[in-house]
Image (cartoon, helix red, strand yellow):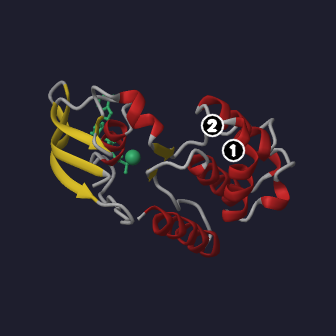
Amino acid sequence: MVLSTDHVGRRFKQREAVHDISLNVYAGEFFGLLGPNGAGKSTLLKIWTTLLPPTSGRAFVDGYDVVHQKAEVRRHIGVVFQESILDDQLTAAENLRFHALVYGLPVALRAKRMAEVLQLVGLADRARDRVRTFSGGMRRRLEIARGLLHTPRLLFLEEPTVGLDPTTRAQIWSYTSTFARQRD
Ligand SMILES: Nc1ncnc2c1ncn2[C@@H]1O[C@H](COP(=O)(O)OP(=O)(O)OP(=O)(O)O)[C@@H](O)[C@H]1O
Ligand SMILES: [Mg+2]
């Protein structure tokens, strides 16, 4: 089991953002969270990615507690948030190198992993271009490459295909299913 969620809830004062969620996700699986605006999806994502503690229940990523073992959880996940976290002024390769540094990816592995993820998302020929020259879909694909660089056990994608054309959307599902198959 890669993700286990046991009666998780989150309150903000009187407002209950997440109510009693229990679910398990296994290696190689895709899990999608659907719901109207304000349903609590982003709040649950923050709990799973250790950015916000639940006010009830417990959650585990690869067996690590999202409240008590934050550092271990973070090492084992990749996250692509709705808002871009790429540096526009840097090239695609520089953005990845920065991520590798933050995650402590061994230098000996770095070039190989960078080439692999850029290849996966079809950006190998754009590695030396600055991100500010990228289209929305290309940025999104680079974000996914970044999220996969440190070989996470689990990749979280927030609103993964919003604003993307049907082709890029299909490509994103294809990269993520390749990733899921490699992981199971
Ligand atoms: N920091 C916060 N303080 C107070 N209330 C919050 C906070 N974060 C979220 N909420 C509330 O929690 C509820 C769920 O919000 P959340 O962002 O999780 O929804 P969502 O399902 O991601 O919606 P969307 O589809 O619009 O992105 C909302 O009522 C929101 O106002
Ligand atoms: Mg949201």
Residue 92 in picture, x, y percent from top left: 77, 46
Badge 1 amino acid: Leu
Residue 138 in picture, x, y percent from top left: 71, 58
Identity of the residue drawn at 29% across and 50% down: 3
Badge 2 amino acid: Leu
Cα–Cα gap, marks 1 and 2: 7 Å
Q: Is residue 116 above or below residue 91?
A: below
Identity of the residue drawn at 73% across and 65% down: 122
- Res 120 → quadrant: bottom right
Q: Does the residue tagged 1 have its C-beta within 8 Å of any atom of ligand 2? A: no
Q: Tag 1, which secondary structure?
A: helix
Identity of the residue drawn at 78% across and 45% down: 93
Quadrant position of the N terminus in the picture? bottom left
**Relative side of 25 to 8, left or right:** right
Q: Residue beneath label 1, please?
A: 109
Furthest toward the front, the residue is 108
Q: Is residue 94 above or below residue 53?
A: below
Residue 53 in picture, x, y percent from top left: 27, 28
Q: Is residue 134 above or below residue 184?
A: above
Q: Tag 2, which secondary structure?
A: loop
Q: Which mark is residue 129?
A: none
Say which of 180 and 125 sits in front. Answer: 180
Say which of 184 and 66 sits in front. Answer: 184
- Res 57 → quadrant: top left
Q: Which mark is residue 105?
A: 2
**Relative side of 92 to 47, left or right:** right
Quadrant position of the C terminus in the picture? bottom left
Residue 52 in picture, x, y percent from top left: 33, 29
Identity of the residue drawn at 37% across and 29% down: 70
* CB-based contact (under 8 Å), mark 1 and mark 2: yes
Q: Residues within 10 Å of mark 2 (few under 14, many from 20)?
A: some
